[in-house]
Amino acid sequence: MRLPSLTALRAFEAAARTGSFSAAGRELNVTHAAVAQQVRALEAGLGVPLAFRDGRGLALTGEGARLAQTLTDSFKAISTALTEITAEDEDRPLRLTITPSFASKWLMPRLGKFWRQHPEIALTLDPDDRVRDLNRDGYDLAIRYGKGGWPGAEAEMFLPTQDVIVAAPSLAGNRERLTIEEMQEMPWITEAGWPEQMAWLRSLGLDPDRLDVTEMPTEELANLAAREGLGLFVELTALASADLKAGRLRIVYTPPKEGDFGYWIVTRPGPKKPALRTFIRWLKSEA
């Protein structure tokens, strides 16, 4: 059979539990006439009498008493489950999926500051270059690089950035900027398995096939090698900021900016729990 409306069931359960339409109306914040109307509509739909007036109160038929008890137990079970789910969600750490380079170069140096300000908020970090499905994998937030527009997610840019070519002072010498011709003859450091980088260098006018390239297995090792002056290195301005400020690296070539690339805060659609809203505000303030 087709289930009655939830509004009618709630009205009947409240009336049966409180013993009157007026008390049920006060509990549900509606008029007693509205409660009575819902109960009569429920009876008409079921074809069974459920309640009748008994003096100034309300009495239940046998069928009404059985339905009322079932509804009371069911609504209590639903309320308990919702309370437990909400409590578990509030207590669990925020789950973040981010790239390893962003985690090590941008987030980790700042994370101590966040925890000093918000020691009550726990975080679980998952450094991974793969684009993860937030809904399927249960993540609260992702930090992704690109131009936005990921299907099924809300995205907001918080850290604009672009690729530049950097070098250690020991390699660049007293040259503030390098030409394409000069860079073609210099050594390079790259991360293995990154064909897009070679395509990007080719777009600048370099010939990757003629470059003296040393590949490193990870971006962290590539960055360390670049700091030691072993070669030129392609890096995002947002991730190079600490090395640039400390003088370990220097920007030697800045290409024309192409589009609105940057790091984006990516979340699941819908309401955000307080801890997540706090973390997002902090990310924006740090950017």
Image (cartoon, grey):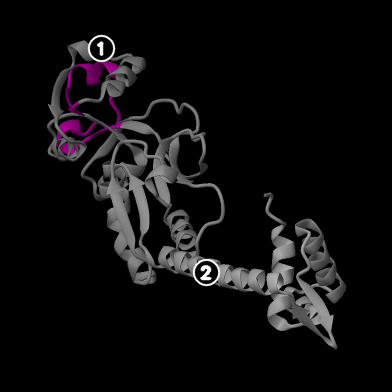
Residue 116 percent coordinates (x, y): 34, 70
Residue 106 percent coordinates (x, y): 32, 49
Q: Can you identify the residue that label 2 sits on?
A: 77
Residue at horizontal 81 percent and vertical 71 percent from the top: 35
Q: In the rendered view, would you say 171 is above or below 247?
A: above
Q: Earlier in the sequence, mark 1 or mark 2?
A: 2
Tags 1 and 2 touching, CB below 8 Å? no
Q: Can you identify the residue that label 1 sits on?
A: 207
Position of residue 279 in the picture relative to residue 109 (left or right):
right
Q: In the rendered view, would you say 102 is above or below 80?
A: above
- Circle 2: element type: helix
Residue at horizontal 33 percent and vertical 21 percent from the top: 200
Residue at horizontal 46 percent and vertical 26 percent from the top: 258
Q: Which residues are magenta?
A: 165-192
Residue 175 percent coordinates (x, y): 24, 31
Q: In the rendered view, would you say 222 is above or below 187?
A: below
**Residue toward you, 60 or 223:** 60
Position of residue 7 in the picture relative to residue 78 (left or right):
right
Q: Is residue 177 magenta?
A: yes
